[in-house]
Structures are given as structure tokens and as C-alpha cells.
Image (cartoon, helix red, strand yellow):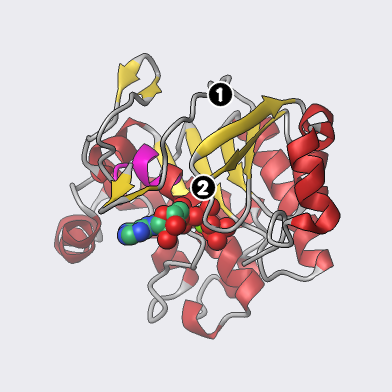
Amino acid sequence: MSFGGLEALKDITFEVRKGAIFSIIGPNGAGKTTLFNCINGIYRPGTGRIIFKDREIQGKKPYRIARRGIARTFQNIELFTYMNTMENLMLGRHTFMKTGLFRGALMWGKRSFAGREEVAHREKVEKIIDLLDLQSVRGKLVGGLPYGTQKQVELGRALALEPDLLLLDEPSAGMNSEEKQDMIFWVKDIQDDLGVTILLIEHDMKMVMDISDRVLAINFGKSIIEGTPSEVQQHPEVLKAYLGEDEDFGHAA
Ligand SMILES: Nc1ncnc2c1ncn2[C@@H]1O[C@H](COP(=O)(O)OP(=O)(O)OP(=O)(O)O)[C@@H](O)[C@H]1O
Ligand SMILES: [Mg+2]
């Protein structure tokens, strides 16, 4: 994946097993978010292949990729701040009804609020509200919620898509330690109870070490090492980076 002369991703190969929590670590600008943007179709990589459930998905439109079962959260929260929690989660189900988020949002009222379909969607959303402990904020405007809670709502919206694969871009960034702990539990629950495969970009090494089945370290758009959390942690290049010669490695942006 190149931007003008900059090759943001050039040599990355990895495989994620169904049901795993697979983390991607690397310094600021390493290419982590770009990788997610290629996987979910926001960017079209120039070369390379991305295979999901035995089919190539590179270059496909985001809504097609979402329909095939890949949901994500963003490094900078992307929610409808003027809508409440419930509405944001309901919008997460747009792929089941319409193409495209905005078309889905516009057509929502006309097409669904009357029907049986809506009841079914609401039931799914209620389950997510329970799972993520969002009852107390279900009717509140998202823009007024604390940052950590907004992150939770965004996670809920991604889950509303009933994904097979969930891409989480720094889910615990900006959270306090208690919120981080909650996030760890939720990510684990999503893996264990829902059987969702998780790709996680995370700067918090404790979280990475706690919950990952496998870890991939990248820098300058290239793989450094892929392995178990402890294998990756002990790799000389990663170790060097974390010992301070490269201050950015492992620190939140
Ligand atoms: N749309 C874009 N146009 C131009 N350059 C881009 C674009 N998106 C990303 N880049 C560049 O690609 C490189 C990788 O960026 P990316 O956002 O993927 O890094 P990252 O690993 O997610 O970093 P961070 O930890 O800070 O989030 C950076 O040099 C960035 O400036
Ligand atoms: Mg990023």
C-alpha cells in the first residue's frame, strides 16, 4: 500500500486462526492502521492478497467486506455523536438491510421502524447492550458520554454487525486502568462467548501480553516477527525498541 512515494505497507505476511486473538504491535507510523484500512476495504492495496474465509477480499468495497463478516472500531472514535447509544448500535446493523452506511442511515426510518425486522434487530442489540454493560447509557446521546464509554459503544456497534472477524484499532487508548481492565474482559468475552476472531492493534503491552494468542510486530511497513506473546517480547528488535532506544515503540500516540 503506497501513498505517493511512501510505501506504508511493503512486506507483511501473516495468518490468523479462526477464534484467535491476534495482536499487531509497532511504533507510531509503522502501518498498523493502514493494514486495517486495507483489510476492511477503505484502502485498495496496489499488490498483495488478503484472504478471508477462503476468498480474496483485497480491493473489495467496505460494505461488501462488512457483509462478509468483518467489523471494526477506529483509532479515533467514529460514532454518530448526536444519536443515542441504542441508535448507534442499531446503525451497526445496517449491513443486514442496506448497502452503505449513509444510505442505510437515511433509509432506516422508512424501511424498518415499522416492521418485524426491527424487533429482531432490537433483540440482537439488547444482547450487546447487556454484554457490554451499556444499560445505563442506552438512551443517552453518545457525544456527551465519557471517552471510555464511547469506546465501549463503538465496540458495541461493531458487534452489532455480528462479525466473524473484529478489527480493534487501539481499543484501550486513552482509558484509565480500570477501564482498560474492563476492555480486556470484554475482548476475552467476545472471543470466548461469541467465538469472534479478533485482530487487535494495541500499544498497551500488558494488554497485548495478557490476551493475545499470537502477536505480530511490524515497523516501516514490514514484519519483524510473528509468534507467541513471549517470543515476540524477547525478539532483539522488539526488546531494543521497548528498552527506550525507540521511545515511540509501545507508546500510545
Ligand atoms: N491516507 C494517507 N495518506 C498519506 N499517508 C498516509 C495515509 N494513511 C497513512 N499514511 C502514512 O502511512 C504510514 C503508516 O500510517 P499508519 O496510520 O498506518 O500508522 P500506525 O502504525 O497506525 O501508527 P499509530 O500507532 O500512530 O496509529 C505513516 O507514515 C502515515 O503517515
Ligand atoms: Mg494507527
149 sits to left or right of 89: right
217 sits to left or right of 236: left
Indicate the quadrant where residue 9 lies. Answer: top left
The answer to whether residue 160 is visible is no
Indicate the quadrant where residue 182 lies. Answer: bottom right
The residue under label 2 is 32
What is the x, y in percent for residue 199? 56, 38
Q: How many marks?
A: 2
When the figure is inspected, residue 175 is found, relative to residue 144, above or below; the finding is above
Q: How far apart are marks 2 and 1 (CA)?
A: 15 Å
The residue under label 1 is 16
When the figure is inspected, residue 183 is found, relative to residue 221, above or below; the finding is below
106 sits to left or right of 65: left
When the figure is inspected, residue 133 is found, relative to residue 97, above or below; the finding is below
What is the x, y in percent for residue 231? 81, 27
Q: Which amino acid does label 2 sit on?
A: Lys
| Farthest residue, direction top | 54
Find numbered disc 2 in the image and state the secondary structure of the residue it sits on.
helix
Instruction: Choose between 80 and 2: the one closer to the eye.
Output: 2
Residue at (76, 60) in percent of width and height: 180
For mark 1, does the 10 Å Cα neighbourhood hold few (<14), some (14 to 19), or many (20 or more) residues? some
The image quadrant where one finds the C terminus is: bottom right
Residue at (38, 49) in percent of width and height: 121
Contact, CB < 8 Å: mark 2 with mark 1?
no
Residue at (20, 52) in percent of width and height: 100
Q: Residue 96 carries which label?
A: none
Which circle, 2 or 1, is nearer the viewer? Answer: 2
For mark 2, does the 10 Å Cα neighbourhood hold few (<14), some (14 to 19), or many (20 or more) residues? many
Label 2 beta carbon within 8 A of ligand 1: yes
Q: Which region of the structure is painted magenta?
A: 36-42
Q: What residue type is labelled 1?
A: Val
